[in-house]
Image (cartoon, rainbow, N blue to C red):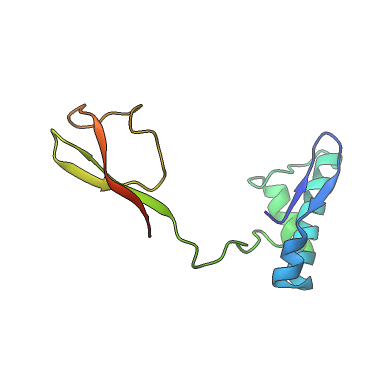
Amino acid sequence: MGGRYHLNTHHLDFNLKVLETFGMEEFIGVVKHELCHYHLHLSGGGYQHKDADFKRLLKQVGGSRYVQSLKPKDQSKLTGCISANSAKIRFIEKRRFNTARYVCGQCKGKLVLKGERVEM
């Protein structure tokens, strides 16, 4: 996240890691982005990302639509191998979840974690 506009207080927050990581040009794009939210909200225009007013103004001022990811590219995700015994289906979970709370979608059997969660 590069910045944030608070609707109630009209305060603007900026993530200085964007400046440190990507430089002044990217940071200025984030500032313009948040100022577009600010201006359109106070003037009664469409200030949300999905609104045409916001997209149009952002393009006019040259603000950035998205900030580059601050996460390292080699950061691995934790996944695990889950299976349902009666359906004999195995899948790799993309997100951790509590296997005790869910059942298999095909056989309604209990989900079992096979092995340990591994980094991928």
Residue 72 sits in quarter = bottom right
Residue 42 percent location from the top left of the image? 86, 40
Question: Considering only vertical position in the picture, is 31 above or below 42?
Answer: below
Is there any visible trace of residue 63 in the rendered image?
no
Tally the numbered discs. 0
Q: Nearer the viewer, residue 32 or 110?
A: 110
Q: Nearer the viewer, residue 39 or 53?
A: 39
Q: Which residue occupies 21% across, 45% down?
A: 90
Residue 63 percent location from the top left of the image? 74, 62
Q: Which residue occupies 76% across, 67% down?
A: 19
On-image quarter of the C terminus: bottom left
Residue 37 percent location from the top left of the image? 78, 47
Residue 20 sits in quarter = bottom right
Of all residues shown, which one is farthest toward the front?
116
Q: Is residue 114 left or right of residue 36?
A: left
Q: Which residue occupies 49% across, 67% down?
A: 74
Is there any visible trace of residue 36 in the rendered image?
yes
Q: Which residue occupies 78% across, 41% down?
A: 45
